[in-house]
Structure formats: structure tokens, C-alpha cells
Amino acid sequence: MSKILTSTFAFAATVGLALTMSTTSVSANEDLIAEGKIIFEETAGGVGCASCHGMDGSGDIGPDIRGYDDLDVSAAFNSVFEMQFLRGDIGPGSRKMKAVGAYIESLG
Ligand code: HEC
């Protein structure tokens, strides 16, 4: 095999690997967002975040939180009295917290 052909194959393999990796992480993130949507709309604390922040996250009893992330949600758990009852359901750093954070971030 010529040198050019060999390096072309090496390049193609690298690009292929990079593409595979990015596709995997995009779909993992989509899974997280899909989980977060259910938590947001229905399951968080048995009522869903939507009951206070609106079905589209644009605000109702609570403020507009579109574009916020899991760290903002953790911070809110530490400071917002109305959200204390959710602590048992959604722990700091948990998958549920990451999922709901990814979902509201995707709304921004
Ligand atoms: C019982 C009502 C209620 C529920 C349910 C609720 N929130 Fe809140 N949330 C509030 C209120 C009220 C505030 C604003 C408090 C303030 O500004 O003093 C707030 C604030 C926030 C903030 C901070 C916004 C800012 O401007 O700093 C975030 C982020 C947030 N909520 C996310 C969530 C998420 C995610 C859920 C679901 C897991 C949720 N909330 C469920 C009432 C609620």
C-alpha cells in the first residue's frame, strides 16, 4: 500500500472515530433531556417543576427558568423556600438533577 493511501485510511479512521464519539454524546445528551422533560412536566416532587414555572418554563408562581442549568437548580434548592419539598426527590448532583438541568437549559 502506498504511503498516501495509508495516511488517507488513517485519516478516515480518525474522522470516523471522532464522528462516532460525537454522535454517541449527542444522543446521550438527548436521553438526558428527554428524562428531564418528564421530571420537569410531571414527576418532580410528585407535581413537576411546571406546576410553578409553567409548562414551557417561562414562569408562573416561580420565575422564567429557560436556559438555566443543573447548577442553578442546585443553588435554588439551597435558597428557595417553596422548592424545599423537592430535595428528597432530586438530590444535588444526581442524575435527576442533571436531567432536569439539561432540559431547562435546552429551553433557553
Ligand atoms: C412550589 C413551587 C415551585 C416548584 C414546584 C419549583 N419551583 Fe423553582 N422556584 C419557585 C419560586 C417561587 C422561585 C423564586 C424564588 C425567589 O426568587 O425568591 C423559584 C426559583 C427557581 C430557580 C432560580 C431562578 C433564579 O432566577 O435564580 C430555578 C433555577 C428553579 N426554580 C428551578 C426549578 C426546577 C428545575 C424545579 C423542578 C425540579 C422547580 N424549580 C420547582 C417555585 C417552585
Image (tube, rainbow, N blue to C red):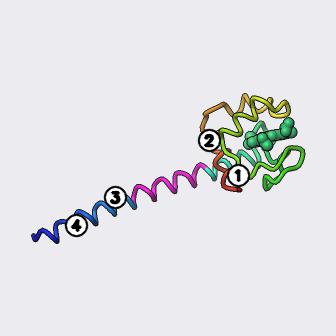
Is the magenta region chiefly helix, strand or loop?
helix
Q: Residue furthest right?
A: 61
The residue closer to the viewer here, 9 or 44, is 9
- In the rendered structure, which segment of residues is drawn in magenta? 20-32
Residue 86, by quadrant, is top right
The Cα atoms of the two marked residues, 4 and 2, are separated by 39 Å
Instruction: Tell me which label, 3 or 2, sits earlier in the chain.
Output: 3
> Which residue is tagged 3?
17
Where residue 11 sits: x, y (%)? 26, 64
The quadrant of the picture occupied by the C terminus is: bottom right
The Cα atoms of the two marked residues, 4 and 1, are separated by 42 Å
The quadrant of the picture occupied by the N terminus is: bottom left
The Cα atoms of the two marked residues, 3 and 1, are separated by 31 Å
The Cα atoms of the two marked residues, 3 and 2, are separated by 27 Å
Q: In front of the other: label 2 or label 1?
A: 1
- The answer to whether marks 3 and 2 mark residues whose Cβ atoms lie closer than 8 Å is no
Circle 1 sits in a helix, a strand or a loop, which is it? loop
The Cα atoms of the two marked residues, 2 and 1, are separated by 14 Å
